[in-house]
């Protein structure tokens, strides 16, 4: 017979342990809105993005963006996103997947056309370049009270983010408790015990009520199984933004994710 | 006593073996210009970028760009870069380090503000997400006669691109001979024998005549030692663009790199 799982700390308790401002804000939002849903609105029209975000906003704790797929970008669009984040109370996570040496990510995070550090609360990074990537991003983001997620695992087939690679992300995270707020994870229960900091958050992409794939390596998981594997925040992309009614879909995922969370406490 | 190294194939011979149009063009350019130098002009001003490129253009086989650190970007800047590439005969390598799932990189490569696939000849990718990232990029780039480099190694301290990770890049490269043209490498002689395709090119970043580091994890190597470790193309950043006279510096690196190459034949 399976052993009973130890009860999980609540999001409130995790928030109280958090050492980073952006992470505290994230847990607070989750509790206030009863939502562990992050929507990835990966449309290419900026106008459509803002429309979808205004619809799904009440149901999400976090908006995940890919600004570099939008047909247009300017300071007004950035300001509109920040306005929507305030109106609906969510944090903005630019899924940039930084993956360069420290000196380069400093510029990629703070400068360029997108000036990501000015409007996003959270970004993420691969550790392939080594710990210098975290040093570089921290130089830009820490003073602005931003947070960084490390990609510990990926949802795509054949990912190299596994085993000792995943363990190294834990090490780098624990060396940077002021700035690293958690992980992109798929099966955190299988490795996150090695992580002593209980405040760190696990966000899981590739969530869909219908399982399957996309023909380019993506593999979907449903909300309940993701939460039971240790995920804290469910990232839903095509399940919401390609739904006939994105608001209704977001509502469904919010409910499914929150019930799955409550059943673990 | 050290064994005599086996002689290397010349760039002409490699070009004759190449299965990808962009790779053939690259080798041809190297031979015509007697240059294995790639300059990374990582300035943040687009105007300054174009000025530097016009100065160093005669000495390089490849321009490496980071468009996402430029203060401004539009179709005219893209057109100016392409004009300079034709004027001075070099290929353009956008060092985007794609690192997302297949479906996302399709949009990141072809769309967004930068439309990278329209003006760059070469891009690169991390294999962390698994082989779907190559499938996605190939969907965009193959028909446009573009080429893809995989990051097999990195020049930064503590990089995770080593051992079995590096070996996996070889496997994915050999599964995609029509599109993958080579690697970002540091010590290719230590692992590239496992790669049966002799046409694949090794490009090495972090090259500087003065060794050292940058305080954010970058570790420099000099041209001669990089070539003797199996590199084909030397990527020089701060050694050229921060030099008092970038044209003169490019000339020096061109000479040092070419003499190092000739000494290996």
Image (cartoon, coloured by chain):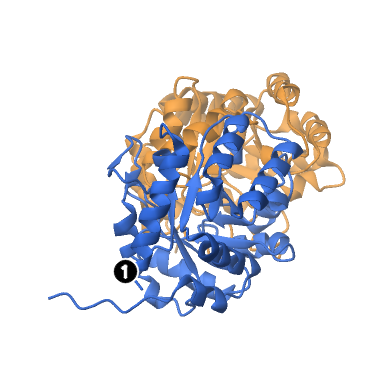
Chain colours: A orange, B blue
Q: Nearer the viewer, residue B44 or A195?
A: B44
Residue B184 horizontal/vertical position (percent): 46, 58
- What is the crowding at mark 1: few (fewer than 14 residues within 10 Å), some, or many (at least 20)? few
Chain of the residue that carries numbered disc 1 in the rendered image: B
The reply to whether residue A5 is in sight is no
At 51% from the left and 56% from the top, the residue drawn is: B126
In the figure, is residue A74 to the left or right of A61?
right
Extreme residue in the left direction: B1
Q: Splitting the image into 4 quarters, where does residue B90 fall?
A: bottom right
Q: Nearer the viewer, residue A72 or B80?
A: B80
At 49% from the left and 73% from the top, the residue drawn is: B171
Q: Nearer the viewer, residue B98 or B13?
A: B13
- Up-down: is B85 above or below B239? below
Total marks in image? 1
Quarter the N terminus of chain A occupies: bottom left
Residue B243 horizontal/vertical position (percent): 41, 35
Q: Which residue carries the number 1 mark?
A: B190
In the figure, is residue A262 to the left or right of B260?
right
Q: Nearer the viewer, residue B256 or A235?
A: B256
- Up-down: is B264 above or below A148? below
Residue B32 horizontal/vertical position (percent): 55, 63
In the figure, is residue B158 to the left or right of B117?
left
The reply to whether residue A248 is in sight is yes
At 46% from the left and 54% from the top, the residue drawn is: B37
- Up-down: is B253 above or below B138? above
Residue B49 horizontal/vertical position (percent): 58, 35
Q: Tell me the element at label 1.
A: helix
């Amino acid at each position: 017979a399976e052993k009973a799982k130890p009860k999980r700390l609540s999001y409130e308790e995790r928030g109280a342990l958090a050492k980073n401002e952006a992470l505290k804000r994230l847990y607070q939002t989750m509790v206030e809105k009863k939502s562990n849903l992050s929507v990835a609105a990966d449309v290419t029209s900026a106008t459509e993005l803002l429309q979808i975000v205004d619809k799904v906003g009440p149901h999400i704790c976090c908006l995940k963006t890919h600004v570099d797929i939008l047909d247009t970008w300017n300071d007004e669009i950035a300001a509109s996103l920040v306005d929507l984040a305030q109106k609906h109370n969510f944090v903005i996570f630019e899924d940039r997947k930084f993956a360069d040496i420290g000196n380069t990510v400093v510029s990629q995070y703070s400068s360029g056309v997108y000036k990501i550090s000015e409007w996003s609360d959270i970004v993420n990074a691969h550790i392939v370049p080594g710990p210098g990537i975290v040093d570089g991003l921290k130089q830009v983001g820490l003073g602005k009270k931003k947070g960084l997620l490390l990609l510990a695992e990926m949802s795509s087939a054949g990912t190299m983010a596994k085993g000792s690679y995943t363990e190294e992300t834990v090490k780098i995270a624990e060396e940077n408790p002021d700035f690293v707020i958690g992980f992109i994870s798929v099966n955190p229960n299988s490795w996150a015990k090695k992580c002593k900091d209980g405040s760190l958050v696990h966000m899981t992409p590739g969530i869909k009520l219908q399982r399957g794939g996309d023909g380019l390596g993506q593999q979907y998981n449903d909300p309940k199984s993701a939460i039971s594997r240790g995920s804290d925040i469910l990232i839903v992309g095509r399940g919401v933004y390609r739904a006939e009614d994105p608001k209704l879909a977001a509502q469904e995922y919010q409910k499914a994710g929150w019930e799955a969370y409550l059943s673990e406490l």
